[in-house]
Image: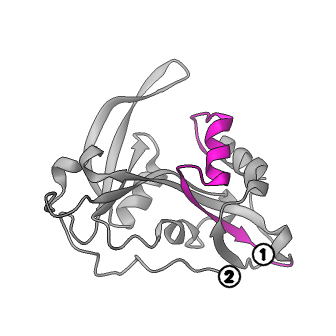
């Protein structure tokens, strides 16, 4: 599943996750993340139970029934006042309840990296919300560089946030502020609508 290189020019499209993505999603997660997720997490992802998720699929030479999962983003909508970044947001909580996007996981199969799939995966239709936030384990330099390139702001370091295989690891908390948050949208305008089939 985690090919080292591709031998064709891929045609990437984006769509919601489907139950048929379950096995591929589990395999990709296992290859990308040190944290092992329970089956319940994956079932919630592919069935849309409390998790908003999108798939990046390669449809090169395939019909829609045979597309190949090559990337994904899984997110959860979180009330701003219950988030870890509530203290850094600038909005009037008395006027309306704001919601944030928390990125649970984001990944692209190695052979498909550097094709801007990850940046499109982050680009969801939530521009009316004050922000998007996520955690990155402190040693994941490629992810840290990716989010900085995407203009996410490093808010704080969280000591011993992760506990993996008997060891504690720190986490970095990254935020991308949108309208109503602490800063306005990036002049680079990387927040387009999803590209769909």
Say which mark, if any, is on residue 134: none
Q: Residue at x 27, y 64 (%)?
A: 130
On screen, residue 8 above or below 173: below
Query: Taking the image as drawn, is residue 142 in sight?
Result: yes
Say which mark, if any, is on residue 59: 1
Does the CB distance between marks 1 and 2 fall below 8 Å? yes
Residue for badge 2: 197
Relative horizontal placement of residue 143, taking residue 10 as reference (left or right): left
Start-end of magenta stretch: 32-61
Query: Taking the image as drawn, is residue 3 in sight?
Result: no
Q: Nearer the viewer, residue 74 or 141?
A: 74
Query: Mark 1 or mark 2, which is nearer to you?
Result: 2
Q: Nearer the viewer, residue 67 or 34?
A: 67
The question of residue 36 being in magenta is answered with: yes
Residue 146 picture location, percent across and down: 44, 60
Q: CA distance from mark 1 to mark 2?
A: 10 Å
Among numbered discs 1 and 2, the one appearing first in the sequence? 1
């Amino acid at each position: 599943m985690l090919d080292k290189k591709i031998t064709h020019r891929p045609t990437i499209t984006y769509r919601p996750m489907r139950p048929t993505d379950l096995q591929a999603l589990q395999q990709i997660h296992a290859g990308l993340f040190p944290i092992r997720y329970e089956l319940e997490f994956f079932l919630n992802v592919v069935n849309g139970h409390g998790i908003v998720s999108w798939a990046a699929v390669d449809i090169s030479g395939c019909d829609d029934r045979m597309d190949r999962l090559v990337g994904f983003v899984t997110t959860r909508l979180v009330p701003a006042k219950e988030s870890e970044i509530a203290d850094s947001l600038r909005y009037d909580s008395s006027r309306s309840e704001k919601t944030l996007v928390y990125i649970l996981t984001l990944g692209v199969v190695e052979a498909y990296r550097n094709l801007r799939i990850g940046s499109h995966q982050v680009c969801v239709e939530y521009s009316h919300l004050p922000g998007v936030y996520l955690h990155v384990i402190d040693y994941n330099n490629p992810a840290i560089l990716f989010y900085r390139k995407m203009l996410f702001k490093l808010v704080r370091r969280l000591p011993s946030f992760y506990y993996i295989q008997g060891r504690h690891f720190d986490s970095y908390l990254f935020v991308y502020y949108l309208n109503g948050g602490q800063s306005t949208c990036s002049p680079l305008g990387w927040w387009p609508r999803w590209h769909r089939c």
